[in-house]
Image (cartoon, rainbow, N blue to C red):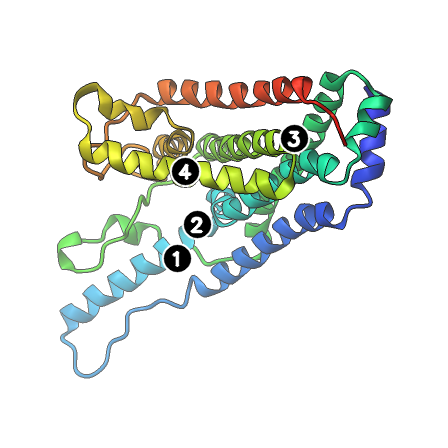
Amino acid sequence: MLSLARADWFRIRRRWDVWIIVLGIPALALLAYVSGALSSGNMQVQISGDVPPEFQAQMAAQDAAMRAFNALPYQFPRSIVTVLEGSTLWLVIGAAFLAASLLGHEFSWGTIRNVVLFQPDRIRYLAVRLAWIVGLVVAIFLALVALGALLPAIVRVDPGDPAALENLDPSQGWVPYGPTASVSLGGVLLVAGAFLVSVAGGVALVGLCALKFRSVASGLLGAGIYVAGEGIFIGLVMSRATGDLRYLPQLTLITRLTALVGDAQQAAGLASGAGGMSSSPGWVALPPLVGASIVAVWIVGLIALWFVVLRRADIHE
């Protein structure tokens, strides 16, 4: 196992695409956070002309509430979720490419035969490669979490007057779009864990496609086709199905990953309403623990199929 891990390290450390992903995603997250933090205080209520004093007081209260609300995402610990939300798409794409390239390139480069001859135990080879994929993804994720925790102390955003949000009268005009209550560190870590699980689901799906089709491009394309097909299937079922058939969309991978993040955000006080497409016609919700169990079955099952596919593969390259 150690010899395989060292051999993989010699390959990985010389690959620029891997380092671009590992270093580029935190860099993009940093730029996005700084840009959002610097622009968070630009929104304000403008008053011109002769305005009655009572209306001026109302507008001043709305301006104070708006400033306090815009500053919330950049206050610790909520800043961690802000960084993760802004970089989740990049992380999913980067992790998917890492999984596809580290698994599929051995076939497209024609080096899989040498690997198998060097280490006939394909299970160990794939286990080490899986460990490297997980290690790289977790390293990027921890870097994002660390940025979210440290940036509020470096890029300071004036929190304004939080009491202005509590005293705001919704019947008088502007109201905040989203929760305004304080968020605990435990709730933030729960949401962060849901984001990481969603990335793991994407890695498991893309990795299986890359192994099955023996190509990086085909692996990414196969995963993309699945995502598109799942979306079409969900739309058809939710518009036509009745009774227990309405639960079928809840068993699909992408739907469950999306609902998992939504459930975590609701539990942490960062969102309202049930996780998933709660406003769509035909949508039925599952208890969060049941949904998390379905996600676990999907991820474990997909990764188990990695080993089945590679063990049974005929190596002709």
Sequence-first tag of 2 and 1: 2
**Dots 1 and 4: beta carbons under 8 Å?**
no
Q: Which residue is mark 4?
A: 183
Numbered tag placed on residue 134 in the rendering: 3
Sequence-first tag of 3 and 4: 3
* Amino acid tagged 3: Val
Sequence-first tag of 2 and 3: 2
Q: Is residue 143 visible?
A: no
* Amino acid tagged 4: Val
Q: Which residue is mark 1?
A: 160
**Mark-to-mark CA distance, 3 and 1:** 41 Å
Percent coordinates x, y for residue 187 in the rendering: 44, 32
**Dots 2 and 3: beta carbons under 8 Å?**
no
Q: Secondary structure at mark 2?
A: helix
Of the two numbered discs 3 and 1 in the rendering, the one whose residue sits closer to the viewer: 3
Sequence-first tag of 1 and 4: 1
* Amino acid tagged 1: Gly
Numbered tag placed on residue 236 in the rendering: none
Front residue of 188/117: it is 117
Q: Is 64 left or right of 218, judged from the image as shown? A: left
Of the two numbered discs 2 and 3 in the rendering, the one whose residue sits closer to the viewer: 3
Percent coordinates x, y for residue 146 in the rendering: 61, 42
Q: Secondary structure at mark 3?
A: helix
**Residue at x 43%, y 38% (from the top left corner):** 227
**Mark-to-mark CA distance, 2 and 1:** 13 Å
